Image: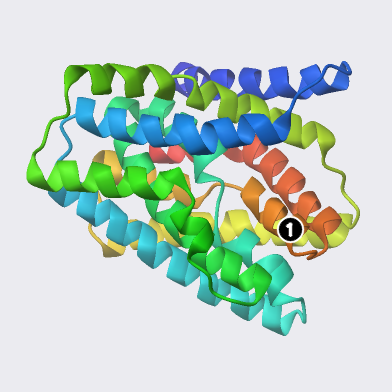
Amino acid sequence: MLLNILAVIAPVFICALLGYGWVKQGLAFDTPFVSRLVMEVGAPCLIFSTFMEISVDMDAFKQMALAAFVALLVFGVIGGSVLYFAKLEQRTWLPGQIFPNVGNMGMPLCLLAFGNEGLALGMTYFMVNTVFAFTIGMMISSGKLSFRELLRNPMFYAVIITVLCLFTGTRPPQWIENTTKLLGNFTIPLMLIAMGVSLARFEITSLKRSAALSVLRLGMGFGVGVLLAHWLGLTGVARGIMILQSSMPVAVFSYLFAVRYNRSPEEVAGTVVISTLLSFASLPALLWFVL
């Protein structure tokens, strides 16, 4: 079991450490370019090619999508309530509590821990998370609901095309499958390297508050993941993916929202850093539990 856990953690840690060390050595890393490349090319192609390559049970797909949706609702209720009683600004801190880092950190773990089936289910959670992040998440940060950003996001169209192909049983031409697979293959390594770069560049300005909110994100995520997996009757790989994805740290795009709408970005960055470091520290126990 220990070797299995090490086999999952080591690639994630090494890739993130590579990004961290790259920046600390003073080498250039164009984060905006890499982020756009991953989110607008790599991730959409990875989603499409994975679901076309792997035979996914439609009931499992729908069940995971429902579980992810319910999890986001519960995260919103619990996180919003805690922030209300703590008298913290909802627009600043709530997105980080609702949306875990199911992309940069979650998808690689799903693949390494549970193989291609785990990656497919992990991406189902990721798709639901992405759609709501670029609608509800941005609405919370900005104070207004706009679908413009979602409609400009290639991920949205990749989700629609993938779901249509799955439900209709349509197979694309081989050249499309090969191209999307080739482009999708760079996504997970770049996600992890970019996460390491972010950890190297972010600074912690309010240690106590950032630590408390980080513990809330991780503890709430794990508890909700376990309870929903039991309540929805998830078993096997689906149960593991539900708990794993729900337990991820604060998503990096919560910081990007904070920067864009001037919601104390330096302090939000602290929750990204601390929750990610705590997540790395607790990964052996989490993987032992789900495996």
Q: Residue 247 placed where, x, y %?
A: 52, 50
Q: Residue 79 placed where, x, y %?
A: 60, 71
Q: Residue 1 placed where, x, y %?
A: 43, 22
Q: Which residue is mark 1?
A: 260
Q: Residue 124 placed where, x, y %?
A: 33, 46
Residue 284 can be seen, yes or no: no
| Picture quadrant of residue 37 | top right
Decide: is 149 above or below 281.
Answer: below
Crowdedness near tag 1: few (<14), some (14–19) or many (≥20) residues, C-alpha within 10 Å: few
Question: Which residue occupies 25% across, 62% down?
Answer: 232
Decide: is 219 above or below 199.
Answer: below
Question: Which residue occupies 72% across, 61% down?
Answer: 213
Figure quadrant of the C terminus: top left
Q: Nearer the viewer, residue 84 or 237?
A: 84
Residue 6 can be seen, yes or no: yes
Q: Is residue 32 left or right of residue 5?
A: right
At label 1, the amino acid type is Arg
